[in-house]
Image (cartoon, rainbow, N blue to C red):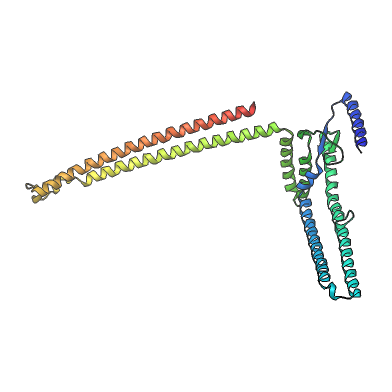
Amino acid sequence: MKKYFAITILVLSSVFQANAQSRGIKIGYIDMEYILQNVPDYSEAKSQLEQKAQKWKQDIEAKKVDIAKLKDALKTERALLTKELIDEREEEIKFQETELLDFQQKRFGPDGDLMTQKAVLVKPIQDQVFTAVQDIAEAKKYDYVFDKSSDLTMLFAAKRYDISDQVIRVITRAEKREQMTKKQVKEQEAKEALEDAVSDNPNLEARKKALEEKKKAREDLVAQRKAEAERKKAEKEAKRQELIDAKNGKKAGTVPAKEKTADETAAPTGENKASDSTAVADPKAEKAAARAKLLEERKKALEEKKQKALEAREAAKKAKEEKKQKTE
């Protein structure tokens, strides 16, 4: 077998060298085991087959338990049985053991049900893989495509030559198209073309990601500006309302001279004098409190605006550095 592999490699090397003189050789490979594990139809069918195999194993174990019980019973009762009965029991045990071996071979032997159904299960997927590989090779001008999981020894294989994921995409897309309308198929083909372009050109994906990040940063900045404008509007409205309230309060604390009664014009007593003093002082205190509150809110608003501007600047700087790193 090793001699066969050595001859195969020498022949392929000769072919590669001959072709290399005329043009560049494009080589790819697939991993059949990896593809089978990632094809939905195969995974589902394999799961069902494993459930069957588990049931067969349970039947085998139950049969072993029955045979063990027969052996234990014979061992316990041997002294009480005649030779004919002992021979009959031993013959029954031997028959059960032979039947168990036959069942094991039928289910798990080289030509048993498990191997047969596995082959039946794999065959349609293999056909799809072969068709997909041919389509990809013709479309992308591959000269040779190997199977990494086959008997052919591959001492090294660079990941960039692995087209297994492309094969999986082709098979999965074909299954999806069967359930689509013509319009949906057309939209899907456009989407697939974009995915293939990204897959063939990793730099395109990096540029796309950078553009998305830049767009997000721009949207965040717009949202911040909008929030700042809303906040300023709310502050202006609050200030306006405070001025109106202060003005109304001042008016409520002042009594026109023409409306004063004779008693009110008389010399005020101590109690009345204190009340008048309070009435005069209240509007001033309210006005001072309103002014202090307004100054505090303005100070707080300026600090928030400064903090948001710093955050926006840092975000823009970070996005610029990330873009520079990706470009390098």
Identity of the residue drawn at 14% across and 46% down: 276
Q: Is residue 83 above or below residue 63?
A: below
The image shows residue 73 at horizontal and vertical percentages of: 81, 71
- 258 left or right of 183? left
Nearest the viewer among 42 and 289 is 42
Q: Is residue 326 above or below residue 227?
A: above
Nearest the viewer among 21 and 225 is 21
- 268 left or right of 111? left
Going by the picture, which residue comes out furthest to the left?
267
The image shows residue 242 at horizontal and vertical percentages of: 31, 42
Identity of the residue drawn at 52% across and 32% down: 315
Identity of the residue drawn at 60% across and 29% down: 323
Question: Residue 45: which quarter of the image?
Answer: bottom right
**In what quadrant of the picture does the C terminus appear?**
top right
Question: Residue 14: which quarter of the image?
Answer: top right
The image shows residue 310 at horizontal and vertical percentages of: 47, 31
Q: How many marks?
A: 0
Question: Residue 74: which quarter of the image?
Answer: bottom right
Going by the picture, which residue comes out furthest to the front?
79
The image shows residue 165 at horizontal and vertical percentages of: 76, 41
**In what quadrant of the picture does the N terminus appear?**
top right
Nearest the viewer among 151 and 268 is 151
